[in-house]
Amino acid sequence: APPALQLPLPDHFQPTGRPLPLGLLRREYIILIEIVLSALSLLLCGLQVEPRYIILVPVLAAIWIIGSLTSKAYKAEVQRRREAFNRAKMDYDHLVSQIQQLGGLEGFIAKRTMLEKMKDEILGLPEEEKRALAALQDNARERQKQKFLEGFFIDAASIPGVGPARKAALRSFGIETAADVTRRSVKQVKGFGDHLTQAVIDWKASCERRFVFRPNEAVTPADRQAVMAK
């Protein structure tokens, strides 16, 4: 196992605090001022005081409003700082997670698992090659016949009811040789009903009857090379 990682801890950093903006009182001071103002307001309203002291009521109200606005600004500043702290914590947690994945025990286990999988794939290549060559041998007849049919072009064929125009229609659908002919592919061409479709199928069958399988050419060097290149 790899040695333990020395992760950067929050204690390793010494951030510098930023003072509150000028004119922004701390929350506890604001609460104290509001309590005092409330008490004075109740006292002035509840007691019979000299008229000259009544002027203090609007002054106290103005101070109250200013205190409320200051309180809102203080809350907004606290919220901004809390969001900045949360962003910094998320960045730190993400950094620690990346370090652990790339260089820690988790990363070591992931890399070892990947290498073990690659090793198994490499060790299994000979067996996979044998299966691919066996599949070539099993499909040799069909592959030879397909290649044989690719040499019979519809344009050069004599098919009852299929003239140059209909041959061009077949060609527009990708049907150019006997190897391309299937009942479904021919019937989708406009103008080819059951009768003309059967005529094309019969022509393909006549081409197939000429095919002779050559076992000694079942798997060519090119076929083997294609398997080895995978």
Image (cartoon, helix red, strand yellow):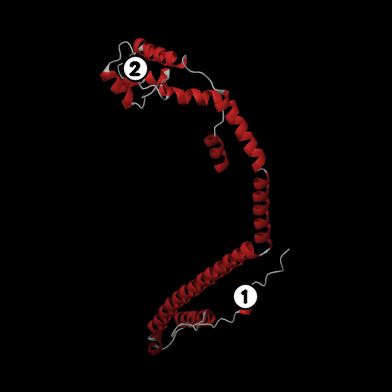
Q: Residue at x 38, y 90 (%)?
A: 52
Q: Nearer the viewer, residue 156 or 103?
A: 156
Q: Nearer the viewer, residue 56 or 54?
A: 56
Residue 160: tell me if it is visible.
yes
For label 1, the residue is 10
Q: Is residue 3 left or right of residue 35?
A: right
Q: Quadrant of residue 165?
A: top left
For label 2, the residue is 157
Few, some or many C-alpha atoms within 10 Å of disc 2 (few <14, some 14-19, many ≥20)? some
Q: Position of residue 149 (x, y in %)?
A: 44, 22
Q: Nearer the viewer, residue 157 or 77?
A: 157
Secondary structure found at label 1: helix
**Quadrant into which the N terminus falls:** bottom right
Tag in front: 2 or 1: 2
Q: Position of residue 190 (x, y in %)?
A: 31, 19
Q: Is residue 8 above or below residue 174?
A: below
Dot 1 amino acid type: Pro
Few, some or many C-alpha atoms within 10 Å of disc 1 (few <14, some 14-19, many ≥20)? few
Q: Is residue 178 left or right of residue 107?
A: left
Q: How many numbered marks are there?
A: 2
Q: Quote the CA–CA distance across marks 2 and 1.
A: 83 Å
Dot 2 amino acid type: Ala
Q: Position of residue 90 (x, y in %)?
A: 56, 66
Sequence order check, earlier mark of 2 and 1: 1
Q: Position of residue 108 (x, y in %)?
A: 67, 60
**Quadrant into which the C terminus falls:** top right
